[in-house]
Structures are given as structure tokens and as C-alpha cells.
Image (cartoon, rainbow, N blue to C red):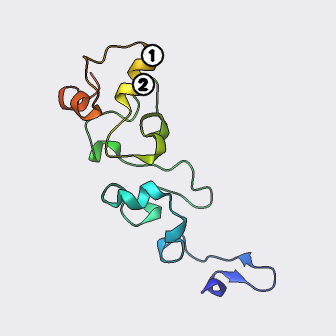
């Protein structure tokens, strides 16, 4: 219940633990976290630290060989707009920078030849 952590009448925050967040806050997770739960898991505290929660830390290398900082970009949203984590944003990024895309329209094709971004 809410009263477990928030005390009436002021509803002040009184968490005694910073684990098990999803048991109450699962609905607060961004849609990408639930759509790609295989990447994120269900334990918020694996990537986030109370009390700020941002930025989250994920082991990018445990998911893909593609670096988490490529050509100066490092925010998740740089390569994953709209929280689409199954592919990157190779084509749009390369086109806007005037970089070559080898006449493909598929980020998956990019990654099949350039898994580490090189």
C-alpha cells in the first residue's frame, strides 16, 4: 500500500530500502523498459541509484559489441530515439551528418557489418 512508504497526512517519503522498487513503481517505468525487459530486467536498482535515478547505468557491452559512446554520442536517446532498443539510429544519424550509409535503409544491416561501430 502507499502507506508503507508514504505517511499520512503529509505523505512524506519514508522508504527504508532502495531495493524492490518495481513492486510498487513498475507502472512508472518508461515504455521502452517494459517492451525490452530482456535488456533491462525488472530490478530498477541494477541501473539506477536512489535518490536521483538519472542517469541510469546499463552495461551496454553485455548486450552488444556496439560501443555506448560512438562518435561523441553517449546518451541512450542519441541512438535509440523513442526508446526503441532493438536497433540503433544508424541511418538517420549518418544521413544527417552526411556520412555514408552504403545504400541501405536498415539499421540491422549496418550492425551486421559494423557491430562495433567501425
- The picture quadrant where one finds residue 71 is top left
Q: Residues within 10 Å of mark 2 (few under 14, many from 20)?
A: some
Quadrant location of the N terminus in the rendered image: bottom right
Q: Residue 53's x, y, as percent?
A: 57, 56
Depth check: 25 or 59 in front? 25
Q: Is residue 46 above or below residue 87?
A: below
Q: Residue 97's x, y, as percent?
A: 45, 16
* Residue receiving disc 2: 93
- The picture quadrant where one finds residue 14 is bottom right
Depth check: 101 or 9 in front? 101
Describe the element under mark 2 as helix, strand or loop. Answer: helix
Tell me what residue is drawn at x 77 percent, y 86 percent. 8
Q: Residue 75's x, y, as percent?
A: 49, 37
Q: CA distance from mark 1 to mark 2?
A: 6 Å
Q: Is residue 55 visible?
A: yes
Tell me what residue is drawn at x 28 percent, y 47 percent. 62
The answer to whether 48 appears left or right of 63 in the picture is right
Quadrant location of the C terminus in the rendered image: top left
Tell me what residue is drawn at x 64 percent, y 80 percent. 5
Depth check: 74 or 84 in front? 84
Q: Is residue 71 above or below residue 109?
A: above
Q: Residue 90's x, y, as percent?
A: 35, 28
* Residue receiving disc 1: 97
Amino acid at each position: 500500500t502507499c502507506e508503507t512508504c508514504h505517511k499520512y497526512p503529509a505523505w512524506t517519503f519514508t522508504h527504508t530500502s532502495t531495493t524492490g522498487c518495481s513492486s510498487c513503481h513498475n507502472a512508472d517505468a518508461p515504455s521502452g523498459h517494459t517492451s525490452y525487459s530482456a535488456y533491462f530486467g525488472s530490478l530498477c536498482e541494477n541501473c539506477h541509484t536512489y535518490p536521483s535515478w538519472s542517469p541510469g547505468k546499463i552495461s551496454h557491452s553485455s548486450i552488444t559489441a556496439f560501443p555506448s559512446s560512438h562518435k561523441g554520442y553517449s546518451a541512450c536517446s542519441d541512438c535509440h530515439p523513442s526508446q526503441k532498443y532493438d536497433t540503433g539510429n544508424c541511418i538517420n544519424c549518418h544521413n544527417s551528418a552526411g556520412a555514408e550509409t552504403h545504400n541501405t535503409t536498415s539499421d540491422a544491416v549496418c550492425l551486421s557489418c559494423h557491430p562495433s561501430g567501425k
